[in-house]
Image (cartoon, rainbow, N blue to C red):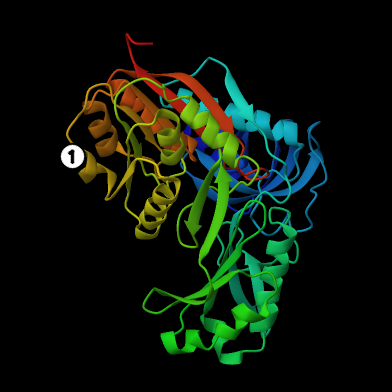
Amino acid sequence: MTARQGARLAAALAPGTVLELAIEKAVYRGRGLGRVDGRVVLVPRAQPGDRVRVLVRKSHSGWAEAELVAVLAAAPARRSAPCVHAEGCGGCAYQQVGYAEQLRIKEAILRESLARAGVAWEGEIHVHGSPERGWRLRASLHFGVADGGLRLGFRPEGSRRVWPVEACQQLSGAMMRTALAVRDALAGRGALLSRLRGLDLLESPEGAALVATLDTGLAAHEAAELATLGRQLPGLTGFGVECEPRRLQWLHGAPYAYASVLGLRVRAHARSFFQANRFLLEPLVREAIGLVPREGGRVLDLYSGVGLFALPLAARDGGEVLAVEHAGSSTEDARWNARQAGLPVRVVESGVEPALAALPVQHDERILLDPPRSGAGPAVVDRIASRSPAVIVYVSCDPPTLARDLARFAGHGYRADAVRLFDLFPDTFHLETIVRLRKLGSL
């Protein structure tokens, strides 16, 4: 490329420039990819097959980020978004795409993520879809004050502004009514408004329990004054306030929701991690533990949360499962769940790497791990691989970090022999993946 061509291209991708693009494919985080003279332009909410007009917002070396201005020619799968807030709230990336196409896009993104990391998967991917409405068990909303009024909703990507939401199709009717009732009950509290940060909701799958937690900058004595709020709201089985210095003060009812998973009763605290999709909760667990062979040595469940996988594994196999989790509320839930079920699950409250370093290796171990979005990382992958487990089942909510970790496992001789995709977050760009790994020679 000549200097003149480079200058012309830089001008074409300069912030403020309006372009017309054909969208070639979808990429992770809900963006469509188009090109200008071979340079990539990423456009939120643009879909493969669209021809669009965009406004360049940010320019980087060799690529740019742009805002969708207009769809000039729509892809065949494009639809009218079923939610009135789809264009503004930032919670959904694929509202404007038919659901079957959403699943196809997510499978393509997963395959590309793996291929880019050098661990391409050419085999079948079993894809599990979900109803698009009312699937959330957990939700986090934000408070904001605008024009003297209290807002409750979501933040558009890259913004601190709160987009007010009156109806979210991800939430059940009970969750949405409770969220609005909390907002309305707090709206007249004047000086408190600027110290309200967010509202977290946790609902049991069948709706028997609904727990709300306010995240605030209030002192403990100020938070205690909100106790009547929990009692006043119909359908709320528990209510607490996170106050300064980052301490949860429980004010009404119990801080737990319960779920029945493969015949086991599982408790989750309002501050414990728990899977978000009520419709795919049990299918996800069934598939993950089904990929763990019944025969073999001890089972290690890493990043085990409340014991969602450890409990049914212990119930199925009858032997001890060792569960490792660093969060205190989750370990308390896991121990309670194991005691109530009478199952041989030993819970270790620890980070995964130090726990593995202190734990003697047993022959033919089976390992399941479900790390956070940041993935397991090199140190944990190396620790796991050094134990030479018979099988590794990796549950992931982030394709790029999954692919990174699978590439490192490949360096230790572990390759995938099964891949599953669960759409735990329909209409959003998120997806859940389960991958089973075995060592070369044992496949």
Quadrant in which the C terminus is drawn? top left
Residue 147: image quadrant is bottom right
Name the residue: 47% across, 23% down. 115
Query: Residue 238, percent across and down?
Result: 56, 70
Q: Is residue 328 visible?
A: yes
Q: Is residue 434 visible?
A: no
Q: Quadrant of residue 237?
A: bottom right
Q: What residue is at 36 percent from the left and 18 percent from the top?
A: 438
Residue furthest toward the top? 441
Secondary element type, mark 1:
helix
Name the residue tied to disc 1. 357
Q: Which x, y percent locates residue 145?
A: 62, 79
Image position of 44 with respect to 437: above or below = below
Left/right placement of residue 76 relative to residue 203 reads: right
At a point 17% along the width and 34% down the height, the residue shown is 360
Q: Position of residue 223 (x, y in %)?
A: 49, 84
Other-residue count near label 1 (Cα within 10 Å), few / some / many at <14 / 14–19 / ≥20: few
Q: In the visual, does 286 lie left or right of 344?
A: right
Give the side of residue 347 with respect to residue 32, left or right.
Answer: left
Q: Name the residue nearer the viewer: 417 or 122.
A: 417
Residue 64, image quadrant: top right
Q: Tell me residue 210's x, y (percent).
A: 62, 63
Q: Is residue 159 left or right of residue 177?
A: left
Q: Three-letter amino acid code at disc 1?
A: Ala
Check the image and report above or below for 383 versus 185: above
